[in-house]
């Protein structure tokens, strides 16, 4: 297991960690206000984002005929793979204390959640999962309008919320974003190769 501790790495890496801490403190402690406290605390909760993805599944079933079942299955597999990659593979390979458990930051962190997870901070599973879904939906539903760009705004805000509430560093989010984007892109290409392009009201 690789330990992401600033004292055991080359100087350039320690500088990167220092910059990461600086951005974390800006987001978590300075770029804040009571409205953001409420909004970002809620955005990271499943109650906020699950209804949207359920809506997309229903939308697919109503509009894409028989292919909707394959689309839904591949969409769900994308989530499973991205979560497995982040929560199991990466977190068990690279361990980093979460900011809310880091003794060097403990007296400074604004913790806006009811608990601080003990799992590794790297990578952010929220970022990985939501960017995987965003890329998959964006590419596979490319005939449904320009609204799809909002998926990346959606994923970015949910990812940003992880730093804002004190459970992740910006680099954790960046790592999750990169991993999720790759997974979402590859799964979209798999779907299009196996099942073709989706079009509205096809049989």
Image (cartoon, helix red, strand yellow):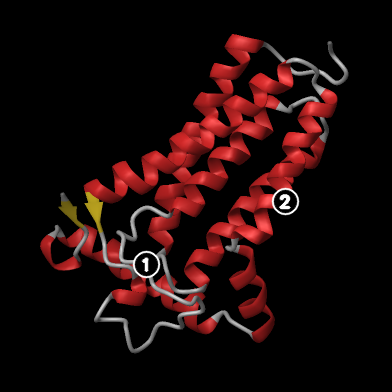
Tell which of 117 and 90 is nearer to you.
Answer: 117
Give the percent coordinates (x, y) of residue 152: 64, 47
Q: Residue at x 31, y 81 (%)?
A: 105
Q: Residue at x 59, y 39 (%)?
A: 133
Q: Are marks 1 and 2 in contact (CB under 8 Å)?
A: no
The image shows residue 12, relative to residue 166, as above or below, that is above
Crowding at dot 2, Cα within 10 Å, few <14 / some 14-19 / many 20+, comes out as few
Q: Secondary structure at mark 1?
A: loop
Give the percent coordinates (x, y) of residue 182: 47, 33
The image shows residue 194, relative to residue 29, as above or below, that is above
Residue marked by disc 2: 51
161 sits left or right of 71 in the view:
left
Q: Quadrant of residue 55?
A: top right
Q: Residue at x 73, y 48 (%)?
A: 52
- Whole-Å distance between the Cαs marked 1 and 2? 24 Å
Crowding at dot 1, Cα within 10 Å, few <14 / some 14-19 / many 20+, comes out as few
Q: Quadrant of residue 157?
A: bottom right
Count of marks overlaid on the render: 2
Residue marked by disc 1: 117
Q: Residue at x 44, y 34 (%)?
A: 81
Give the percent coordinates (x, y) of residue 114: 48, 77
């Amino acid at each position: 297991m690789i330990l992401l501790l600033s004292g055991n790495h080359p100087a350039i890496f320690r500088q990167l960690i220092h910059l990461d801490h600086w951005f974390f403190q800006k987001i978590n402690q300075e770029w804040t206000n009571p409205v953001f406290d409420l909004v970002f605390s809620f955005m990271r909760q499943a109650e906020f984002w699950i209804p949207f993805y359920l809506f997309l599944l229903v939308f697919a079933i109503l509009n894409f005929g028989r292919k909707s079942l394959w689309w839904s299955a591949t969409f769900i597999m994308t989530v499973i793979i991205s979560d497995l990659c982040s929560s199991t593979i990466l977190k068990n390979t690279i361990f980093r204390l979460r900011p809310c458990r880091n003794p060097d930051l403990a007296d400074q962190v604004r913790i806006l959640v009811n608990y601080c997870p003990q799992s590794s901070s790297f990578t952010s599973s929220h970022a990985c999962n939501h960017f995987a879904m965003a890329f998959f939906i964006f590419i596979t539903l490319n005939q449904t309008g320009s609204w799809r760009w909002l998926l990346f705004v959606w994923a970015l805000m949910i990812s940003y919320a992880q730093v804002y509430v004190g459970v992740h560093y910006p680099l954790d989010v960046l790592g999750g974003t990169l991993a999720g984007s790759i997974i979402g892109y590859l799964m979209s290409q798999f779907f299009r190769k196996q099942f073709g392009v989706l079009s509205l009201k096809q049989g």
